[in-house]
């Protein structure tokens, strides 16, 4: 519970963050939880670290701010992101970039050549 007695761990009872959870996430994170993304947490969606569809709870320890782009991209392309623990129950994500699904290398440049690795 928070200082006002509002429940911050909802488990699987609800999918979307409650207003109290949203306030708590914004107090914990300044920006989108993807490293280098400057969008303020106040303008982000509240996202699950362990996805709701995969059984993740709507608990404060599993929630963080994700800008609309990173929220969608992380679910469409989970292989492009690495999750990092930054505290007991805080997370960040590092964008790893696009890789070719065949070679594990970055996709070719428009001229057909790969960048030097």
Image: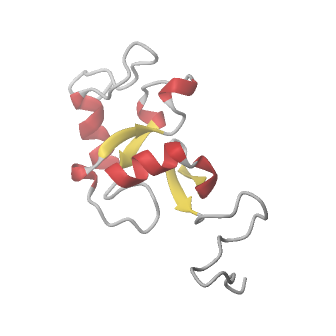
In percent of width and height, residue 62 lies at 48, 35
In percent of width and height, residue 100 lies at 69, 63
Q: Is residue 29 left or right of residue 49?
A: left
Q: Is residue 71 left or right of residue 109?
A: left
One can see residue 4 in this view: yes
Q: Does 113 sit above or below residue 2? A: below
As drawn, the residue found furthest toward the top would be 13
Residue positioned 26% across, 58% down in the render: 40
Instruction: Looking at the picture, tell me which residue is in the foreground, 71 or 91.
Output: 71
Q: Quadrant of the N terminus?
A: top left
In percent of width and height, residue 97 lies at 58, 66
In percent of width and height, residue 15 lies at 38, 22
Residue positioned 65% across, 75% down in the render: 108
- Tell me where residue 69 sits by quadrant: bottom left
Q: Does 114 sit above or below residue 31? A: below
Instruction: Looking at the picture, tell me which residue is in the foreground, 66 or 4.
Output: 66
Q: Quadrant of the C terminus?
A: bottom right
């Amino acid at each position: 519970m928070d200082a006002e007695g509002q429940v911050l761990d909802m488990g699987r009872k609800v999918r979307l963050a409650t207003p109290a959870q949203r306030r708590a996430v914004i107090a914990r994170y300044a920006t989108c939880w993807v490293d280098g993304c400057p969008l303020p947490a106040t303008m982000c969606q509240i996202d699950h670290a362990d996805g709701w569809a995969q059984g993740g709870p709507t608990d404060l320890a599993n929630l963080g701010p994700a800008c609309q782009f990173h929220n969608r991209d992380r679910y469409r392309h989970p292989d492009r992101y690495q999750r990092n623990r930054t505290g007991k129950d805080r997370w960040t994500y590092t964008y790893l970039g696009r890789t070719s699904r065949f070679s594990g290398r970055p996709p070719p440049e428009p001229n057909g050549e790969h960048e030097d690795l």
